[in-house]
Amino acid sequence: MAQLSRTLVICALDLRRRVRNRSAVITTVVGPLAMAIVFGLLVSGTSELTVRIGVVDLDRSAASMSLVSSLLADDGSEAADGDPGGAAAQQVLQFVELDPGGAALDGVRNAVADGTVDAALVLEAGFGAAATAGGSGSLVVVQDPEQVVSGQIAASVAQSVAAGYRQVGLSVATVMALAGTGSGAFDEALIDAAGAQSPALSVQEVPVGGRDLSAAAFYGAGMSILFLFFTVGFAARSVLAEREAGTLDRVLATPTTAGAVIAGKTLSVGVLGVAGFVVVWLVTSVLFDAPWGDPIAVSVLIVSTVFAIAGVATFVASLARTERQADAATAAVTFLLALLGGNFVGPNQPPLLRRLSVLTPNGWSLRAFADLNADAATLSSIATAVSVLLVMGAVFGSIGVRRVRSVMVR
Amino acid sequence: MKRLLAVQAFTAVVLRQLLRDRTALIFIVALPVAIMIIIGTTFGGQQRLDLGVVAPEGRAVTERLLAALADGEGVRVHRYRDLESMRKAVRRFTVVGGVVVPVDADGELAASGATVLSIVVPRTSEQAVTVRRVLDGAVRDAAAPLTAAAFAAERTGTPIEMASATAEFLDGPDGAEAAAALGGGIDVHTEAIGTGRSAGESRFSQTATQNLVLFTFITALTSATLLVRARRTGILRRASATPAGVGTLLCGMAGGWFALCLVQSVVLIVVGAVGFGVRWGDPLAAALLVVVFDIVGVGAGLLVGAAGANEDRVGALTPVIGIVAGSLGGCTVPMQFFPAAMQRVARLTPHYWAVDAWDALVFDRAGVNEIVKNLVVLAGFGAVFVLAASVGMRRVLQSGR
């Protein structure tokens, strides 16, 4: 009981010192909030984007002209069946006819290069004949490698157009082969019927459901975790600092045990870590209207994340002999884990990084926060993440505490 | 002459102190290189469109659809076991959208000649359009022989299996000529134009230039802590009583940090060039840019050091300032992804002008003439920072803080 009250005294003393010093406020609240706001603003969307695709008809046949007019009538705001969730309310895709002039393909290249259009489709001479009567014809997609999205859209439109003609050609050829009429005989009625055949594969849009991951909430959690290392690593570092300053010996000369000192210091950083996390949670939720998900699950995840990071940070700091070494080791491990865990790169992680992130506590925590935020979590996914975090915290923490204790009584 | 020697002596002391500091060394060399490797390896190269697919294994429709998606421009397919897990992945931005093939798609095709695939598109409008178009192209591509088979079976009264086999043959390499002779032989070619910035450059080029700007600035800002420490421990007051004076001491400290930033810049440039094949462009222009930007960084460090009251607080704040200013200036998320309003805000940071100049040197093979504007703006930032820092420092010393 006496040790408990001493633990609480040490905890309160450390808390007071750190809050008065204000550096704790910077690492627990100001830093993560500033970074979450900046990243939230930077990746909050590029919804003003409109993709303009130029269409050039160098063939001037009936088929090419018909295709051009159907593309020009396409305002890009169509939805497949079903409600796209209001996604296509604004026009983001526009087809414009380019006048080839005398320069033909060079003129198109210039139009794409100078940004008049973002990409272009060129119906080359012979297109109509190839499409309807055999022979070869080309549809050229002119794209700027810098304009990735426009290039993808233009290439897909071309793929779609070519598939339409291919379907008609194949249909006629298959009928002729099966009927034994051989190739080369054109039957206009048959071609028209093949063109009118409804496709074997059609698509129906289904709503994405739930809610999208909020950048502010994601980076709020990500940056809080990042700064947690500095906040909670302070416990072990302050033991080293007190040892260097000689105050530790004086404390241990009292009835206070080494365990009570460690527990008090760990409790103080734990309280600070949780408090900072909660402030960032509340501020981003209110400021960006970014709910983090089910409050109970978020609370459990915050506490287990602080526990895990406290364990790892204590272990790392316990490897050092001086406070300066502890600072260096904490900084290095923090950034390495943050990089591997995906704190800096956002939710859309490359597969390699996603695999590496399971080796880190921050990777597990961040993924669980993202799942909760995007309404994609299940009880088992959160339970797994929380269990892994608790195990990591317990394993690293117990080794770290044992090492710190041995340093204290050495 | 004596003052110059004093500045040199101070610079040497600062450099020695810094080189003994392992934390500083981690931030100066190891961290930027590690970030360059991780970001360059995982994100470098061509941008991908990540799409989800839920489809039964080993079915004809699945195979056709996967083949058609593989033909798509920069598409990377992720398989999911059911619609719900794919919808979650879309909400988490693991994939931008996806398509579901019904379990009995082949059976439905055999029975009725048609089947319906479900597609999931994201809520953001420009991504939704991309996903719809890419999936539409792939589905139509996959559907062509299936539609032809259904059409032929209906026309000729042949069983669908036989019509499918015929259509498959004609759609394959052996039958393509016969089918194309009857029309539909449209070839799609893609032609890439423009500077093709990313095409000819190392995949590490973008991250290397961003890291150089981000980390030299953070390193330079760290000088603020040293300055606050010198003030708090009375070193500056003692220096003001010596013949060398505070100005000499400050020049010496700034010189030490400037030298360190130069060393860091050179190390990152050499590692980028030798280790990752980054071509940094015109040497004269690159050298001028490094020198001017390092002056800006040291100026900012002196300013924060003059304004800050507490070593711990300044130590905690400088990395935040460095990363926030760097992110706003395009050092973490490339500028082209910024919303329009944030692109305007970015111009208020020196990082924007430095990253923009590096982009011109590395990707557009520009020379000094093309980046003069950036150098002038950066010099302006440097002059303002140094001036504000000296005014602030004079006030602080006069007030005895």
Image (cartoon, coloured by chain):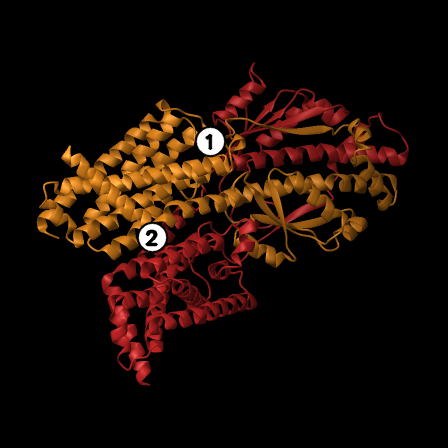
Q: Examine the rendering and report whether any part of residue B19 can be seen.
A: yes
- Residue at the spot x=51%, y=26% of the render? B194
Residue B254 in percent (x, y) is at 23, 41
Location of residue A407 in the rendering, given as x and y in whole percent from the top left corner:
36, 70
At x 38% / y 72%, what residue is drawn? A406
Asked whether B258 or B75 is in front, the reply is: B258
Circle 1 marks a residue in which chain?
B
Query: Identity of the amino acid at label 1?
Result: Arg
Would residue A202 appear left or right of B38 to someone viewing this image? right
The residue sitting at the top extreme is A102
In the figure, the shade used to draw chain B is orange
Relative to residue A347, is residue B213 depicted above or below?
above
Query: For chain A, what colour was chosen?
Result: red
Q: CA distance from mark 1 to mark 2?
A: 34 Å
Residues behind callouts 1 and 2 on a single chain: no
Which residue occupies 58% across, 37% down? A152
Q: Is residue A275 visible?
A: no
| Residue drawn 28% across the image and 72% down it | A248
In the structure shown, which secondary structural element does the residue marked by tag 1 occupy?
loop
- Label for residue B279? 1
Q: Report the amino acid beneath label 2.
A: Ala
- Report if the CB atoms under discs 1 and 2 are less than 8 Å apart: no
Using the rendered view, name the quadrant where residue A319 is placed. bottom left
In the rendered image, the residue lying farthest to the right is A180
Q: Is residue B189 left or right of residue B390?
A: right
**Front residue (pair B127, A221):** A221
Taking depth in this image into account, of B360 and A245 the one nearest to the observer is: A245
Q: Is residue B101 above or below residue A119?
A: below
Query: What residue is shown with label 2?
Result: A34
Image coords of residue B49 (percent x, y): 57, 43
Depth check, mark 1 against mark 2: the one in front is 1
